[in-house]
Image (cartoon, grey):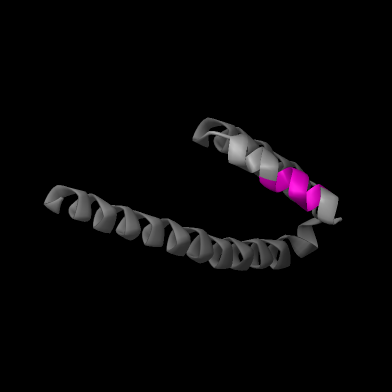
């Protein structure tokens, strides 16, 4: 498992934002296909679960992105004073 995670980390270091966008579209489409297979009586539970997972992961991703942007802005300000 460690080897697989190492490969994934190495791959992601070589990816551009376009590659990551393709991965996200691929996974989003897979999610839609899986959602179409959920029986009608379980769609509400599946929707609530997906919504909760989305909310948690979105907060985590945006928190990291905002932290990155703020760090970059601080670095840019420091360069302006140099």
**Predominant SS along the magenta part:** helix
Residue in the foreground of this view, choosing between 42 and 1? 1
3 over 30 or under it: above or below = below
Seen at 15% across and 50% down, the residue is: 82
79 over 49 or under it: above or below = above
Can residue 36 be spotted in the picture?
no
* Residue 49 place in picture, x, y as percent: 68, 67
Can residue 33 be spotted in the picture?
yes
Residue in the foreground of this view, choosing between 33 and 7? 7
Residue in the foreground of this view, choosing between 45 and 54? 54
- The residue lying furthest to the left in this view is 81
Residue in the foreground of this view, choosing between 14 and 63? 14
Q: Is residue 50 left or right of residue 18?
A: right
Write down the quadrant of residue 11 in the picture: top right
Q: From the image, which quarter does the N terminus lie in?
A: bottom right
Seen at 77% across and 57% down, the residue is: 40
Seen at 59% across and 35% down, the residue is: 15
* Residue 56 place in picture, x, y as percent: 56, 68
11 over 51 or under it: above or below = above
- The residue lying furthest to the front in this view is 82
* Residue 18 place in picture, x, y as percent: 53, 31
* First to last magenta residue range: 4-9
User: Residue 73 colored magenta?
Assistant: no
Seen at 33% across and 59% down, the residue is: 71
- Total labels: the figure holds 0
Q: Is residue 70 left or right of residue 10?
A: left
User: Residue 6 colored magenta?
Assistant: yes
Write down the quadrant of residue 41 in the picture: bottom right
């Amino acid at each position: 498992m460690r080897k697989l995670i190492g490969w994934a980390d190495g791959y992601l270091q070589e990816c551009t934002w376009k590659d990551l966008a393709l991965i996200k579209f691929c996974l989003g489409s897979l999610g839609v296909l899986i959602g179409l297979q959920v029986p009608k009586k379980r769609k509400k539970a599946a929707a609530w679960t997906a919504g909760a997972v989305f909310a948690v992961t979105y907060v985590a991703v945006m928190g990291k992105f905002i932290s990155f942007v703020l760090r970059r802005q601080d670095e840019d300000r420091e360069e302006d004073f140099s």
